[in-house]
Image: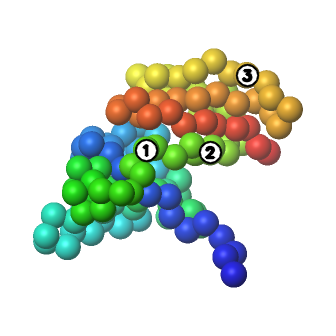
Amino acid sequence: MIHQLGQVMLYVTNQDDALKFWKEKVGFAVISEEDNGQGMRWIEVAPTPEAETSIVLHNKEFIAKMEPELNLQTPSLLFYTEDLDKFRENLLKQGITVGEVMTMPTGKVFNFADDEDNYFAVLEKK
């Protein structure tokens, strides 16, 4: 039986730029970086080294050639933060495209885009 979500595969056009975005702009930690020497490189990032779920940045072009039937679209990800306004302000300072704060039945939420125009949502959850 499944008991937790381990990793989310994020297929990106430029792994180095994606790594820079998640590490330098969003503040994620690099958990691991591997290269099999045959063109398969993956980079694992997470909000903290102790996080139970991480994002693995894969080369979209390489994966498309390896597994053409695979859906390479960006998954809808919802991140949690305890201080939505502070986190949003930090993203704005980094020059990241950030949406307006909306109040939903579950709490305050906004979205932001990475450098490849993939959008992600953030929910304040205390």
Q: Please state if 106 lies on the left or on the right of 34 as rendered.
A: right
Name of the residue lying farthest toward the top? 100
Q: Please state if 83 lies on the left or on the right of 126 as rendered.
A: left
Q: CA distance from mark 1 to mark 2?
A: 18 Å
Give residue 91's position: percent from left, percent from top: 50, 29
Give residue 53's position: percent from left, percent from top: 56, 63
Residue depicted at x 50% and y 58%: 8
Q: Which mark is residue 73?
A: 1
Classify the position of the N terminus by image quarter: bottom right
Nearest the viewer among 121 and 80 is: 121
Q: Earlier in the sequence, mark 1 or mark 3?
A: 1
Q: Earlier in the sequence, mark 1 or mark 2?
A: 1
Nearest the viewer among 14 and 91 is: 14
State the SS at label 3.
strand
Q: Which residue is mark 3?
A: 102
42 to 1, vertically: above or below: above
Name of the residue lying farthest toward the right? 105
Q: Amino acid at mark 3?
A: Met
Q: Which residue is mark 2?
A: 79
48 to 75, vertically: above or below: below
Give residue 88's position: percent from left, percent from top: 59, 28
Query: Does residue 90 appear in the picture of this structure?
Result: no
Is the C-beta separation of discs 2 and 3 under 8 Å?
no
**Within 10 angstroms of label 1, few (less than 14), some, or many (20 or more) residues?**
few
Nearest the viewer among 71 and 18 is: 71
Name of the residue lying farthest toward the left? 38
Q: Amino acid at mark 2?
A: Phe
Residue depicted at x 73% and y 22%: 102
